[in-house]
Image (cartoon, coloured by chain):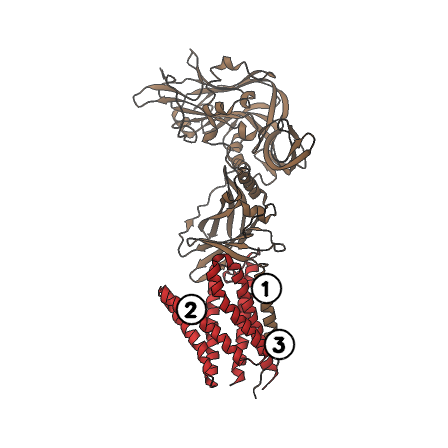
Chain colours: A red, B brown
Amino acid sequence: MNAKSLFWFFVGFVFVGFASSLWSLLTSILTVMPMPLPYWLLYTPGNIATAGIIVTALMPALYTYLGVALVLGKLLRGLVPIIMVTAFTIGLALLLAKLAIPALVILVIAYVMLIGTYTVLISVTTSRASKALWGVAAMVLALMPPILIGGGLTVMNYIRYMAITEQTMAITASAIETWRLGTHNP
Amino acid sequence: MWSVSRALPVVVLALAIASIVVLVVDGVGASPSLIASIHIGGFGEVDYYASQPMPNVPPGLLVRVYLINGSIIEPVDAFIDVYANAPSGIVHVAMGYSSSLTVPFNNTNWQYAINKWASLGIPFSGYNTSMLVFITYVKGNESWIVPLLIPYNVGWVYRALGKATLSAATPRYILVNAFININELRPSRVVPVRLNGTVTDPQVFGTYNGYTVYNCSLSGPEPPNIYTSSPSYEFTPTSTCLGFNGSLPIAWVTLSNGVIQNDEGLQFELNIYFSGTINWDAMSTDYGDLGTSYSANENWVLSSPTYTIGSQITQPGSVYWYYGGATWAIVNYEVWYVEGTMGAYYMGTTTVSEVLYAPPYDTNVNPAFDYGNGTISMLYYGAIPVSRQYFGYPALNASTVVDYAAFIYTSTGQEYLYQCNGPVNVTTSGTYAITLGGVNTAYGLSLAELGTGLGGLALGISSMLITPSTSSSVTSTYIEFFNVKTGTNLYISVIDASKTYGLPTFGFILNATSYYGNPTTYTCKYGKVAQIG
């Protein structure tokens, strides 16, 4: 198993998380400021969707990289992120083709595989703190759908907080792992 | 062994910490979050943001203008004009030439519209209204105009200004992105026009057409405090006071181009008879007639010369009586409800129009012609935009017409006199007098009488000599026609501008083909149609 490959995955994970959250904070504040702004710097639904698409394109790329790196390192669990990305891509394609039910089924599989990917990450990370954080993030990820289904739109705020917690955990875990892999050379 | 810059893990750690801070800031709602969005065709979009108060960014409306040319989208300077819908009409709120314009909720004009809605007494959820935004982009001799309707709720404004607590999250910032798509929108050709010298902008202090527009909260004549009893209100002038010093009209006749062309030889006199004390009342947009704010002894028993169309009068315009050296003002007053033992309660503000000064007796009272740059033109053109802004509706329109009468030459070759709503007095010598109830009775008219005209009151000049006011002895204003003959086409509309301006001011508007403002409903009483000649 090549630790270098994993190192770059975690660096990428933090970068994407940082870029997307910074973009939304900066644009949301700048947008209401009385100053001329280029259109792409506005926090409008169109731009938020574009940013979302960029992030959704970058994250599968990162997970594919993770999966391939693991498989090449003779770890077959690398197939989990690869299946996740494949399922996600197929689900999205079905959604674009307006086949809602099959898309939903495939996307549910993708979501389960995402939780699986977090579990895979727990197994391959080297620090205990990082393992714990990925673990909590995976649990939050697993809890979100049942809560959303049970509570509907009334719990939307809690879901939002849970998503933020999950992202915070994942980013922190990635940062710790980057730090460990970058400063303690195996 | 692989080499990685030692700095990279540090950078990643810093970025991670920064991301977490950003996520938390976002999570607690400290930064603006998009809660609703509307697309207005391809012309624009409206985005509503809930947010904690941001330093130096007052809550309100922010308009941004973007030019779309092919795949390029960029901010561009344009004329941005913002209006607020009020229950009684449209109020001009703000304008500018820029690529973005901020209109805070506490903008005075916007507040005026907001208070108008609030005064209706509907629950907050029922206050859904809108702003109107017009974007005009000009390039070379072409212009593109984009109108946008921006829905909002009055409750949001109150909440953002801390005046109300609403349960649900409400927008604090409303962003309007206007798109000038020069590939899809057809431009209008700009036709250069000669600026009309009669249109004045009273927002700018200075002298226009013989009027001195001044800030009457700083220099005299200044508006007085006004008190009313039952209910007890005290009205205190604020620092917003727009004074107009110059000639104020008493009565006028406006002749259209059609009359000049069709009714050559027709003669008329405009007469004002008044003797006694005139009480000029302050008229509030919210509280109505507040009572006398200025009074003076006047003695106007004056007949104009006989004017003949085609001789003395050869072009469209107005003939009018005025008193010179007088001052009229639009004043913003603070309103206090006064209760005997408990003190005073602040009720908000209201806009009042009132006369601040008029010369006594017949000092400086004269007839004059106005061919587009005089007092009457000021009333028609200059004061209309002002009244539209301050009162929410134009002062002079079809609804301010109180009387109608007409001399009509029918297709069968007969001349008829039609009395519609209005009093016409016919003398045996063949003159016709359209009489008004005199200057001082203007305020004595009930709403019902204003609605149905003065017909019941004014049966003739003689009956008008006895007035309801004890302070005056003679009061009458009328226009008298001579030389009405077969073929005369004359539609007479009598306009009452008193209610809006606080000036006892009436106008006779003469047209050749229809009544002023093309009214859709007016009553011509049966038996009031008389064949002439």
Residue in view at x 49 percent, y 44 percent: B129
Q: x and y percent of residue B525 in the render?
A: 39, 20
Quadrant (top left, top right, bottom left, bottom right) of the C terminus of chain B: top left
Classed neighbour count for the residue bearing mark 2: other residues with Cα under 10 Å, few (<14), some (14–19), many (≥20): some
Q: x and y percent of residue B106 in the render?
A: 59, 46
Could you confirm whether marks 2 and 3 are on the same chain?
A: no
Mark 3 belongs to which amino acid?
A: Val
SS for callout 3: helix
Quadrant (top left, top right, bottom left, bottom right) of the N terminus of chain B: bottom right
Towards the viewer: B312 or B241: B241
Mark 1 belongs to which amino acid?
A: Val
Label 2 marks a residue whose chain is A
Q: CA distance from mark 1 to mark 2?
A: 28 Å
Q: Are marks 1 and 2 in contact (CB under 8 Å)?
A: no
Q: Which residue is mark 1?
A: B24
Q: Which residue is mark 2?
A: A108
Towards the viewer: A6 or A80: A80
Q: Which residue is mark 3?
A: B10
